[in-house]
Image: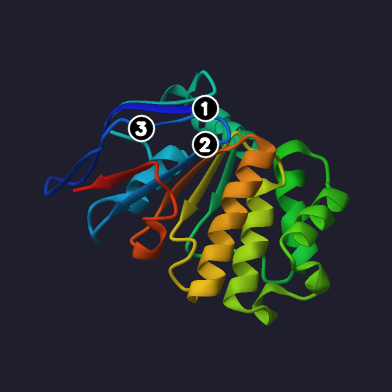
Amino acid sequence: MINTKNLRFSYGKDTDFYFPDITARSGESLLITGGSGKGKTTLLHLLGGLLRPQSGEIIIQDTNITALSEKKLDLFRGRNIGLVLQQSYFVASLNVIENVALSSWLATGNLKTEKAKQLLGQLGVDGHLHKIPSQLSVGQQQRVSIARALINEPKLLLADEPTSSLDDENAFMVADMLEALARQYGSALVLVTHDQRLKDRFPNQITLS
């Protein structure tokens, strides 16, 4: 579902990242680890089309996203890539279910409110549908972010440090949910993290050095 080849990204003249080639098929999970400053978040932003590489290819379901125009890339991302970022970027004036359903409307023009309810129920936050995100705990906000990322049944699900701010119980619960939901929706799941608790949880992994 995703393949990369010879990815390179540079922040000016002093910071060059050369990333290993990665592959993850539909329903598979890949954990990317590495110390601070090794480019984990940069790589995830490249895979999600939020950054453009200096060179190399990113193939998602037979589409080389590095060759797309900005407009086509935005459309492709909305329909095919789900993002769970460190900062949730909720619309502060909208409640939980509105935030999740908004992602479906932006990507497809359809407001999938019932699908949003279903996902929030699976993630155990259906009792908070009409709260605004700031009223939720960090763990609850994380689950809403996952629901939002899955609303369009993406081919690729990307998660940036999804467990770093959670205690052990909730960290493993979120990891289990991400993997199970990715399998359910046939998404390739790529997680980037420095959370050592996950290293034994996901056998398929790459360490950036």
Residue, disc 2: 28
Residues at circles 3 and 2 in contact by the CB criterion of under 8 Å: no
Tell me residue 126's x, y (percent): 81, 67
Specify whether 101 is left or right of 178. Answer: right
Residue, disc 1: 1
Instruction: Report, in whole angstroms, how far the alpha carbon at label 1 lies from the one at label 3.
Output: 11 Å
Residue depicted at x 82% and y 49%: 115
Tell me residue 162's x, y (percent): 49, 61
Residue depicted at x 49% and y 52%: 159
Mark 1 and mark 3 lie on one chain; the one further toward the N terminus is: 1
Looking at the picture, tell me which residue is in the foreground, 51 or 69.
Answer: 51
Q: What residue type is labelled 2?
A: Glu
Residue depicted at x 71% and y 41%: 152
Q: In the picture shown, does residue 168 fall above or below 45?
A: below
**Mark 3 or 2, closer to the camera:** 2
Specify whether 97 is left or right of 163. Answer: right
Quadrant assignment, res 132: bottom right
Quadrant assignment, res 16: top left
Tell me residue 196's x, y (percent): 34, 63
Residue, disc 3: 22
Residues at circles 2 and 1 in contact by the CB criterion of under 8 Å: yes
